[in-house]
Amino acid sequence: MKFVCLGFIEESKLEAVSPEEGQRMMDECFAYDDELRRGGHFLGGEALQSARNAVTLRMKNGAVDVTDGPYVETKEMLGGILLLEARDLNHAIALMSNHPGVRMGPFEIRPADEAINKLIADRDAAVGNG
């Protein structure tokens, strides 16, 4: 099964980390990601820029409305995603429990919707993007 692991962090907490500590943390995360790769569990991931650089789109009065920043009011912002292959949710929890990024903030682990993702893959193949 595929899981999307959403890593959250308080931006003020991240800003308080020294460059040396930040590099040490990244090195630890990369090392654990490599361990996940060796086990066939790491499918990919993306780090995200600050939520201050985000925009939110929504329909308002029949038109698209663009708002600066994230939609929700929260201290913790989405910092990145990790795509994980695991047997089941308990296996995904066990794998991510050892990830150093959990020390910086919570991770939401959510199963990928394999039925919808198959439709997307089929569509990509049909239009030549697969």
Image: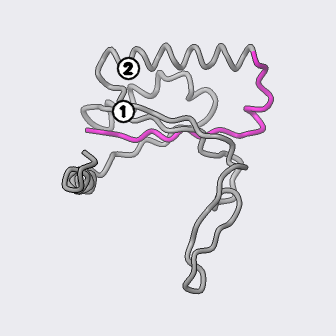
Residue 89 part of the magenta segment: no
| Residue 109 in the figure: left or right of residue 64 | left
Q: Residue furthest bottom?
A: 61
Amino acid, disc 1: Leu
Chain part drawn in magenta: 1-19
Q: Is residue 86 above or below residue 51?
A: above
Determine the residue positioned at 55% across, 38% down: 80
Tag 1's secondary structure? strand
In the rendered image, the quadrant that contains the N terminus is: top left
The quadrant where residue 83 appears? top left
Disc 2 marks which residue? Answer: 36
Could you tell me residue 105's position as x and y percent? Answer: 62, 35
Q: Position of residue 127 (x, y in %)?
A: 24, 56
Q: Quadrant of residue 101?
A: top right
Where the C terminus falls, by quadrant?
Answer: top left
Residue assigned mark 1: 84
Could you tell me if the residues under marks 2 and 1 are in contact, i.e. CB atoms within 8 Å? yes
Q: Earlier in the sequence, mark 2 or mark 1?
A: 2
